[in-house]
Image: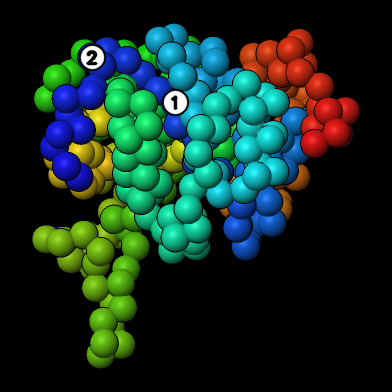
Amino acid sequence: MDRKLLESIENDSVYAIIPARSGSKGVKNKNIRCLKGYPMLAYSIAAAKLTSGVSRIIVSTDSESYAKIAKYYGAEVPFLRPAQFAGDKSADIEFMEHAIGWLYENEKKLPEFFLHLRPTYPFRKPELVSKAVELMKNDDTATSLRSAHLASNTPYKWFALKDDGYFKPIKEGITLDDANNPRQSFEDVYIPDGYADVLRTSYIIENDLMHGDRMIGYEVPGGVDVDAAKDIEFLEYFAMDHRNELMDYLEANYKTLEEAGL
């Protein structure tokens, strides 16, 4: 991206950005599928509202109907994302650079950080999201922060299959017998998830990359990132007996999607 954009960055400012394209094939309209009557998109907006230091909440969507829902639940939708950045194979860097470019061209100001919240991860603790933002702000050398949870099983015990039909270890430098050692013999491995990412705007502008090679590893509790209909069914069951701050916030301030006629 053009480095002249760097001149528009406002130090210490944080915008939440929530990507919500409409073309999901695995679970149709999963970004607005309801949990306890509220669309998953609304839970991410609520999390951003309850996160310390966030000055704006922007939803990047290609859908007019999604935009209407996002605005009702308290987010801004200053633009619609072009279709070429909202396909099945579109990379996250595309919607981020589009948002940065639009904000520069139309407002001439950019945040120092973007808090990236995926709508498919509806249940978060705002205090953990706030801590993620603070960690990033306090590390001038970090290119980004990504949340992840500890893997219960190590992939280092797995095998890859060679062209000749024989197995080989996934981890370099060990034998097939070494791969049979107890899990505790291997280093911990973390699975990236949708809890919260914090991105440095200047790094994106200068490198056309989102995360870089100095990415803070932020460990969070394991949760459900919706990728299939069964995930939504599990969350509905879970929500029956587990209240959380985001549900309380939505119920206290907004109608359900059906009640709002959206």
**Quick one: which residue is furthest to the bottom in this view?**
164
Question: Can you say whether 99 is above or below 157 in the image?
Answer: above
Residues at circles 2 and 1 in contact by the CB criterion of under 8 Å:
no
Q: Position of residue 56 (x, y in %)?
A: 46, 19
Question: Can you say whether 82 is above or below 119 in the image?
Answer: below
Residue 16 circle label: 1
Q: Give the residue drawn at x 27%, y 13%.
A: 12
Residue 137 circle label: none
Task: Answer with the quarter of the image where residue 155 lies.
Answer: bottom left
| Left or right of residue 97: residue 129 | right
Residue in front for this viewpoint, 123 or 151: 123
Residue in front for this viewpoint, 149 or 164: 149
The crowding category of the residue bearing disc 2, from other C-alpha atoms within 10 Å (few below 14, some 14 to 19, many at least 20), is few
- The answer for how far apart the CA atoms under marks 2 and 1 are is 15 Å
Tag 1: amino acid: Ala
Q: Quadrant of the N terminus?
A: top left
Q: Give the residue drawn at x 55%, y 33%.
A: 77
Residue in front for this viewpoint, 173 or 83: 83
Secondary structure beneath dot 2 equals strand
Residue at numbered disc 2 = 11
Q: Give the residue drawn at x 67%, y 56%.
A: 27
Q: Position of residue 161 (x, y in %)?
A: 31, 78
Q: Position of residue 103 (x, y in %)?
A: 36, 32
Residue in front for this viewpoint, 176 or 162: 162
Is there any visible trace of residue 140 in the rendered image? yes
Q: Quadrant of the C terminus?
A: top right
Q: Position of residue 218 (x, y in %)?
A: 33, 27
Q: Give the residue drawn at x 23%, y 14%.
A: 11
Secondary structure beneath dot 1 equals strand
